[in-house]
Amino acid sequence: MGNLSASEIAIILVIGLLLFGPKLPQVGRSLGKALTEFKRGLKGLEDDFEKAQRDADRELDEEERLKKIGPPPEPPPSPTSPPEHVEDHTPHVS
């Protein structure tokens, strides 16, 4: 099968055209639509990959920046809970 001459290939193509000739435009359209859809999907995957890569790069840059400036300052200590009983030193008027 690997030893086909040019004339044999031409005969096969002519037979193929005779058998499938009327359907070739439809096959071509279908093939074109499929190829276009495939390229669109591939472009979407490339865009998603590039976005994920940019996001990862930003995270690494942010981590490096935070390492350079040090950890954030600690928040002030929270006030202790108020005493449960406060003595009243005001004079009572009766």
Image (spheres, rainbow, N blue to C red):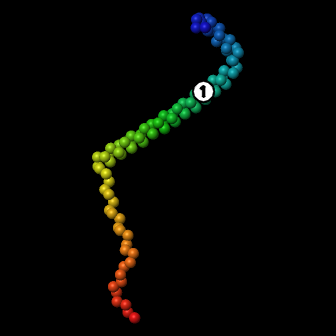
Total numbered labels = 1
Give the residue at x 60% y 27%.
32
| In the foreground, 79 or 84 | 84
Few, some or many residues within 10 Å of mark 1 (<14, 14–19, 20+) = few
What is the x, y in percent for residue 58? Answer: 38, 43
- Please tell me whether residue 14 is drawn above or below residue 82 in the rendered image: above
Quadrant in which the N terminus is drawn:
top right
Q: Secondary structure at mark 1?
A: helix
Question: Can you tell which quarter of the image residue 26 is in?
Answer: top right
- Please tell me whether residue 62 is drawn above or below residue 31 in the rendered image: below
76 displayed left or right of 42? left
Quadrant in which the C terminus is drawn:
bottom left
Instruction: Tell me which amino acid carries mark 1.
Output: Gly
| In the foreground, 12 or 61 | 61
Give the residue at x 32% y 62%.
76
- Please tell me whether residue 14 is drawn above or below residue 42 in the rendered image: above
Give the residue at x 68% y 11%.
15
Give the residue at x 67% y 15%.
17
What is the x, y in percent for residue 66? Answer: 32, 48
48 displayed left or right of 82? right
Q: Which residue is mark 1?
A: 32
